[in-house]
Amino acid sequence: MLEIALIIALLGLSVAGTWDLLTTEVPDEVPYLMIVLGIFIWYANALTIGDFMPLFYSMLFGTLSLAIGLLMYKHGAWGGADAWLLGATAFLMPMYNGNVFIFDFVFNLLIVGSVYMIVYSIVLGFLNPHVAGIFYKDVKGNAKFIVPPLFLAAGFAFYEPRFSIPLALISSLIIFWRYARVIEQHVFRRKIKSSQLKPGDVTEDMIWRGITSHEITELRKKKKYVIIKEGVRFVPAFPMTLVVTLLYGNLLTMFIAL
C-alpha cells in the first residue's frame, strides 16, 4: 500500500507543480483527489491486514498538516494550494521508515524551498534585464547596512577558516535579501488597467488566492487601475522535496553527521 501511496503522492505533486508553473493556479481537484485516495488506501489496508494504525496516523497528521497550512494561508504566508497539498501529502504518506513522514518533509521543504526560490528569483532577473540596474542602485543606496556585515564576516572567516563556508552562505543571504526586495517591488507587482484583469490574478490587497469573475466585475466599477501581485510559483518545490526526503530522509540528520 505504501508504494501505491508514494506513486500517487509523487504523481499528484508533480501535476500540481507543473500546473502552477505554467498557469499560477492549481486545480482544487488535485489535492482533493490525493486526500480521498490517501484515506481510501489506508482504509483498504486496515481492512486487508487488520492494522488500523496507518489509517489513524493518516487522519491525524493529514488533518493537523492541513489545519496548519490553512492557518498560514489565512495569514497570507502562502497560497491555498500549498496548504491543501501539504495536507494531501500527510494523508498519503503518514509514516515512512518508522518516522512521521510529514515532519521530515516540512523541514526539508524549508531547505529545498529556499534553494528553489533563490534559483527562481535569479532566473526572473535574467528574464527582466532592467532589474540589474535597479539592484545596483539598491545595493549602493543601502551600502551602510550591507557592507559592514560583509566585512565582519570576511574578517571572522580569515581568523577562523573553518567557519568560512557558513559565513559565506550568510553573506550571500544578505545580498540575496536586497535582490529579493528588488524582484518583489519591480517584477512581482505591476499596475494594469482593471479591464485587463482576468480570473486567477491576485490584487495587491488580497491574500494569496485568485480573483473571481464576479469580483472582477465589481472591481471594474470602482477602479480604473489596479496593482496585481505575483509570487514565486512555489508548488514545484513540493515534488522536489518529496524526492529528496525519500532519498535522504531528514536533511538535518545529514548536517549533524557532517
Image (spheres, grey):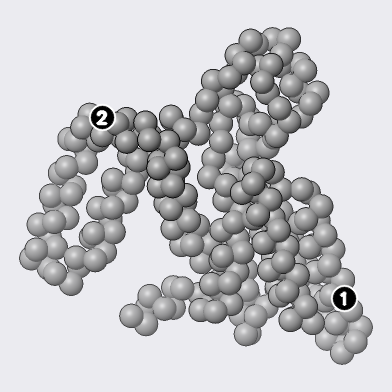
- The residue at 71%/14% (across/down) is 220
Residue 130 visible? The answer is: yes
* Percent coordinates x, y for residue 66 in the rendering: 70, 56
**Taking 194 as reference, is 114 above or below it?**
below
Question: In the rendering, which numbered label is found on residue 210?
Answer: none
Residue 35 relative to residue 65: left or right: right
Closest to the observer, 244 or 65 = 244
Up the image or down, 125 lies above or below 250; here it is above
Q: Is residue 92 visible?
A: no
The kind of secondary structure element at disc 1 is helix
Residue matched to label 1:
43
Residue at image point 80% right, 23% down: 214
Q: Is residue 228 above or below residue 154?
A: above
Looking at the rendered image, the disc whose residue lies closer to the viewer, 2 or 1, is 2
| Image spot of residue 148 (x, y percent) | 15, 44
Few, some or many residues within 10 Å of mark 1 (<14, 14–19, 20+): some
Q: Which residue ends up furthest to the right in the rendered image?
A: 47
| Quadrant in the picture for residue 35 | bottom right
Q: Nearer the viewer, residue 68 or 147?
A: 147
User: Amino acid under label 1?
Assistant: Tyr
The answer to whether residue 78 is left or right of residue 52 is left
Q: Nearer the viewer, residue 96 or 168?
A: 168
Q: Secondary structure at mark 2?
A: helix
The relative height of residue 235 versus residue 162 in the rendered view (above or below) is above
Residue 137: numbered disc: 2
For image coordinates 58% across by 27% down, the residue present is: 228
Q: Position of residue 80 (x, y in %)?
A: 68, 45
Q: Residue furthest bottom?
A: 49
Question: Amino acid type of disc 2?
Answer: Lys
Which quadrant would the C terminus be assigned to in this image?
Answer: bottom left
Q: Sequence-wise, which precedes: disc 2 or disc 1? A: 1
Q: Residue at x 7, y 65 (%)?
A: 159
